[in-house]
Amino acid sequence: MSSSRLIKCLSSNNNYIVRSFSKSSIPTTPTPDFPGEYKEPIVKTQIPGPQSKALVEKLNKLQDPRAAHFFADYANSRGNYIADVDGNILLDLYCQIASIPIGYNNPELIKAAKSDRWVSAIINRPSLGVLPPKDWPALIENSFMQVSPKGLNQVFTAMCGSCANECAFKAVFMHYQHIKRGGKPFTPEELSSCMKNEQPGSPSLSILSFKKGFHGRTFGTLSTTRSKAIHKLDIPAFDWPAATFPDLKYPLAEHAKENREIEDRCLQEVESLIKTWHIPVAGLIVEPIQAEGGDNYATPYFFQGLRDITKKHGVSMIVDEVQTGMGATGKFWAHEHWNLTSPPDIVTFSKKMQAAGFYHNLDYRPSESYRNFNTWMGDPVRALELEVVIGEIKKNHLLDNVVITGNYLKEGLFDIASRYPGIIQNIRGEGTFLAIDLPTPAERDRIISHIRLLGVEMGGCGERSIRFRPMLVCQPSHINQFLNRFDTTMKELFKH
């Protein structure tokens, strides 16, 4: 069916969607319904519609708009639904690249934002490292430290996921050199040589990352990003090592022996690179799930092995939880699934946390001030927002909701996949942090475009994957709407 015919059908008949998933089978969760939320998607025009297209033309004269899906109307977005400027209402399973935690226009956030406390933070933005506000220690306690990873009792606040990782690299290098010099003061030679970008003040050190990983687009993080060439083209890069991340076979239960052998080979490669790379490896960074690279997974066994190797060789372990943190896998931090013998040295965060930065212990605090530093050092408004979000997660049992909703989504995907053998592949994930593969990038893109016309906003990752990144407030009833539309999409595109 052509897109214009599909829109006509949708506009004239809201019951066009084939209701193959029974409402009676939808599980309940302890999470209350979102106040004032739309009941279902509403599609009135093509997506992007005429007003979105007109705004693209206008923006194109000022800024590059080529990555935009459509122009949103945030004032009219509610809960799990995003509105666009053409009056369309879409169920949002992409959520600003996994960064919306508790729904558009959440009433509790609106209420908090009207307080004098928020107003002061908005209009008097401080340089936190120099002149922190009087309530900053209490705010850190009530926000960041309420959810600090087990075993880590310090937090460094930053501006975004990329700079969280960038500053984490700096902390690792400073820690490595501090240990190397035995805690002694800097030598005159170190102080003078660093001003010329020469050793020993500018040491030759590296961060080990993994192929297909994504850690940001700032200069240092880009050298550890290996997901897509387009991110890295034309940018000078550090000569840093990249190890192979496990490429597991699915279903996992049917390939346990083979997957263990794959992970063992990857662990052997990591240890070999640490021992033989021509630039000393000071740190290792890894995502619990390689999100941008295609939602690539490894088992707890693999990550336990990484922790053992890093401890053995004095390499700092950075766990990049920018996309996986804040509950999407059913635990607040994805690395909680691993049962590590000792915590990571550093855990970075952003996205659903609203704020950004990294957790660490005191030994990763630089020996002198002003070394890991910038003007803003984060934003008190985002810490205030995080404080409310954490309260909502706890009050509304959102982690339990994620587990129930994720199980329902996964079961529905398996059900649809059974009717399209060889097309929907490698269903995987924890909680609602799920993904599927399609045979080709073109087929993946066709599905995303088609289902958007049915009122569901989604996104891809890697070469041929569709990723699911719903909000923590997404319930099985929302997933039921998606499954019906996904089933329709598959029938239309694959004529089953």
Image (cartoon, grey):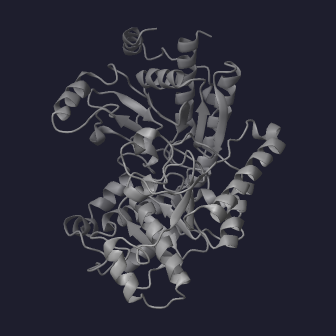
Residue at image coords 36%, 11%: 4
Expressed as whole percent of the image width and height from the top left, the position of residue 124 reads: 20, 70
Instruction: Identify the residue at the far bottom of this view.
Output: 184
From the viewer's perspective, tell me whether residue 202 is left or right of residue 276.
left
Residue 479's image quarter? top right
Q: How many marks?
A: 0
Please say if 472 is above or below 366.
above
Expressed as whole percent of the image width and height from the top left, the position of residue 434 reads: 59, 40
Please say if 338 is above or below 472.
below
Q: Nearer the viewer, residue 326 or 362?
A: 362
Q: Nearer the viewer, residue 239 or 366?
A: 239
Please say if 452 is above or below 17.
below
- Asked whether residue 28 appears in the rendered view, the answer is no
Residue at image coords 60%, 30%: 437
Q: Which of 362 and 242 is in front in this view?
A: 242
Residue 452's image quarter? top left
Residue at image coords 53%, 32%: 463
From the viewer's perspective, tell me whether residue 301 is left or right of residue 20.
right
Expressed as whole percent of the image width and height from the top left, the position of residue 253 reads: 80, 40
The quarter of the picture where the C terminus appears is top right
Expressed as whole percent of the image width and height from the top left, the position of residue 75 reads: 27, 42
Please say if 320 is above or below 361.
above
- Asked whether residue 465 appears in the rendered view, the answer is yes
